[in-house]
């Protein structure tokens, strides 16, 4: 009985996490190559952040190219955080140390709504010109369609996904 309770509890917890990632079928269909690795927030995948806390994302590229960072909040609102940032191969952290605002280094602050937020890092071998994608609230299917449309503009492409959770203070 105790084992059954543990299994049910784990299944309930797993159901709370967003369904992130791109399936192997999608990777084949979208023609992705393994270029991005280690894409995670600074507290690890699924890390919890209080409102107004800063979050950083690290990742490694196996070849130079352009990356775009997109988020989808728990209410399905989609926002482009970085677009067509040209980077060399190697390890990187967003926001970049060179990103500046009036107060100093740019930061990503956790803002409402509470709950899990998905982050997709899109790699392309050339900059993508379509600025009409990833706007407003999108269903999971629309998010995937926008991702596929964005990636289809480049001959070499990849995508990685992670998530974090905004919690009350």
Image (cartoon, rainbow, N blue to C red):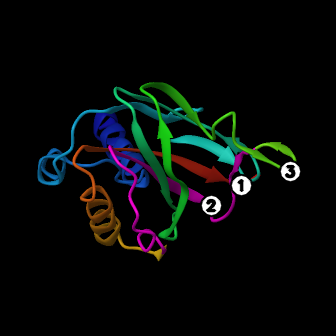
The one nearer the camera, 122 or 160, is: 122
Task: Look at the image and give the residue range highlighted in magenta.
Answer: 106-135
Can residue 108 be found in the magenta stretch?
A: yes
The numbered dot on residue 39 is: none
Q: Are marks 1 and 2 in contact (CB under 8 Å)?
A: yes
The kind of secondary structure element at disc 2 is loop
Q: Nearer the viewer, residue 11 or 21?
A: 21
Q: Is residue 141 visible?
A: yes
Q: Determine whether, in the image, residue 29 is placed left or right of residue 43.
A: left
Observer-nearest of 9 and 135: 135
Q: Is residue 54 left or right of residue 95?
A: right
Residue 45 seen anywhere in this rendered image of the structure: no
Residue 5 higher or lower than 26, as above or below: above
Tell me where residue 141 appears, x and y as whole percent: 28, 69
Residue underneath mark 3: 102
Residue reaching furthest to the right: 103
Read off the residue under disc 1. 168
Give the percent coordinates (x, y) of residue 28.
Answer: 12, 47
Which of the two marks, 1 or 3, is nearer to us in this view? 3
Please report the residue visible at 66 percent of the width from the left and 52 percent of the height from the top: 167
Mark closest to the chain's N terminus, 1 or 3: 3
Q: Earlier in the sequence, mark 2 or mark 3?
A: 3
Q: Is residue 91 above or below residue 52?
A: above
What is the magenta segment's predominant secondary structure? loop
Front in this rendered view, residue 168 or 149:
149
Local secondary structure at mark 1? loop
Question: Circle 2 sits on which residue?
Answer: 114
Q: For mark 2, does the 10 Å Cα neighbourhood hold few (<14), some (14 to 19), or many (20 or more) residues? A: some
């Amino acid at each position: 009985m105790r084992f059954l309770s543990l299994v049910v509890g784990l299944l309930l917890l797993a159901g709370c996490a967003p369904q992130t990632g791109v399936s192997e079928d999608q990777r084949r269909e979208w023609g992705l190559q393994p270029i991005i690795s280690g894409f995670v927030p600074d507290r690890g995948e699924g890390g919890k952040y209080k409102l107004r806390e800063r979050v950083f994302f690290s990742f490694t590229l196996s070849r130079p190219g352009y990356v775009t960072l997109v988020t989808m909040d728990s209410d399905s609102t989609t926002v482009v955080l970085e677009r067509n940032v040209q980077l060399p191969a190697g390890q990187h952290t967003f926001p970049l140390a060179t990103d500046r605002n009036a107060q100093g280094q740019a930061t990503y602050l956790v803002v409402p709504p509470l709950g899990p937020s998905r982050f997709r890092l899109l790699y392309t071998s050339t900059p993508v010109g379509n600025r009409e994608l990833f706007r407003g609230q999108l269903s999971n299917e629309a998010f995937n369609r926008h991702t596929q449309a964005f990636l289809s503009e480049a001959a070499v492409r990849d995508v990685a996904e992670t998530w974090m959770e905004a919690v009350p203070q």
